[in-house]
Amino acid sequence: AQSVSQHNHHVILSEAASLELGCNYSYGGTVNLFWYVQYPGQHLQLLLKYFSGDPLVKGIKGFEAEFIKSKFSFNLRKPSVQWSDTAEYFCAVNRDDKIIFGKGTRLHILP
Amino acid sequence: DTEVTQTPKHLVMGMTNKKSLKCEQHMGHRAMYWYKQKAKKPPELMFVYSYEKLSINESVPSRFSPECPNSSLLNLHLHALQPEDSALYLCASSLEAVTSYEQYFGPGTRLTVT
């Protein structure tokens, strides 16, 4: 079945640690890829997106993601996390005019 | 203005009630969406409106009835809901209902069905 998989359901890190959240999708052909973030009590916000071009995309708040077509992956990275990065992170694929979300990764940063 | 607004923020309704959720955007977007999000789960698409016409219905039960009165407004009419329909209902919009445009989400309406 076509899907979006996020490998880590719950990640706990200390401040200043590096972050990498995995995302794989199983759709063939052209896809548009997103990472959304949902801070506690807030609405979904777009962190970054990949449509075409440079596979390394930079988003807000120091986040970046790399699209690796051969691996069907779109992993999210941040070199040094902050306590304020505590949130739920969703990888998503936009295909056939629909956004399909992964199950999400709950990130908890220890101060 | 890059905001999608939703009212009410919270709604508690009985199984025999009729209520409506409202969503509004003034970004000139021509596509609007309803999603349902259960606790600790990702949003699930319910409906897509493109140019004020329903283009996608993800097999949603008829007790949920969407309406798009104009390009800025999207309503979700609720009738005879079940307790399992309790969830966060999210509205989103995008410039067009095609894959190349990102969606902007509202804060949601937290619905409790008693």
Image (spheres, coloured by chain):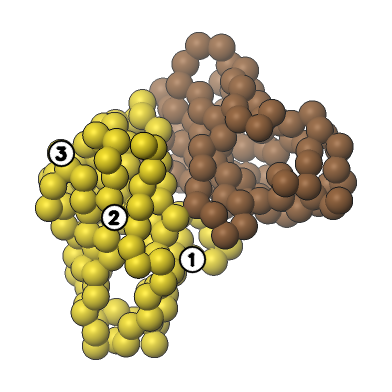
Chain colours: A brown, B yellow
Chain assignment, label 3 = B
Looking at the rendered structure, the kind of residue marked 2 is: Cys
Q: Quadrant of residue B51?
A: top left
Marks 2/1: CA distance?
Answer: 19 Å
The residue identified by callout 2 is B23
The mark that comes first in sequence, 2 or 3, is 2
The residue identified by callout 1 is B38
Quick check: can you spot residue B77? yes
Numbered mark located on residue B51 in the image:
3
- The image position of residue A43, as x and y in percent, is 50, 52
In-image side of A86 versus B92 (left or right): right
Labels 2 and 3 in the same subunit: yes
- Give the residue at x 21% y 45%: B72
- Give the residue at x 58% y 16%: A55
Chain assignment, label 2 = B
- The relative height of residue B20 versus residue A99 in the rendered view (above or below) is below
